[in-house]
Amino acid sequence: MSQYPPPYQPGGPMNYYGQPPQYPGPGGYGGVPPHSGVGIASFVLSLLSLLSVLGMIVMIGSLISQAQRSRMRPDEPELAMAGCTIIAAGVLALVGAILGLVGVNQQNRRRGFAVAGLIINVLVLLGMGIVMLIGVSRRA
């Protein structure tokens, strides 16, 4: 069974201009290529990594305010959770950037999501790198 409507039959329905209705062919209307699935995955991972970084910022702000009120020990579970969040955000952004590169280089696919995912993932990775460099330089 075909997924497209049958060809026009004489005496069939007409549109407003008195012509038979136009149905998309196998390429869709105007032959627009579909979105890249890898690009969409890159964009989703970029949003997840961005949310992880924002969650990390909130968590670290909470830890700083808690540390100012009382003495924190290095084995606090909140510190471990902040470290896991940093690692998870970095892994998500790295995988998303790789998928974005693959999506940008795909042929016959739309690249909008791949480009957006690649840009957001690279910005997240750069931001994390800058924050880590600032942290390391303050320790020294």
Image (cartoon, helix red, strand yellow):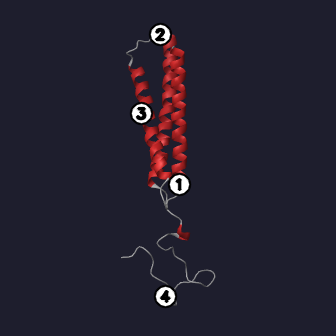
Which SS class for mark 2?
loop
Q: Amino acid at mark 3?
A: Ala
| Kind of residue at disc 2 | Ser
Mark 1, Cα crowd under 10 Å, few <14 / some 14-19 / many 20+, is many
The residue under label 4 is: 9
- Mark toward the viewer: 1 or 4: 1
Give the mark nearest the N terminus, 2 or 3.
Answer: 2
SS for tag 4? loop
Residue 34, percent from left and from top = 49, 61
3 or 1: mark nearer the eye = 1
User: Residues at badges 3 and 1 in contact (C-beta under 8 Å)?
Assistant: no
Among the 4 quarters of the image, the one containing residue 89: top left
Question: In this figure, which residue is indicated by the disc labeled 2?
Answer: 70
Residue at mark 1 = 111
Which residue is labeled 3 in the image?
88
Amino acid of disc 4: Gln
Outermost left residue = 1
Question: What is the x, y in percent for residue 100?
Answer: 48, 47
Percent position of residue 65, x then y: 52, 16
> Which corner quadrant holds the N terminus?
bottom left
Residue at the far bottom: name it. Answer: 10
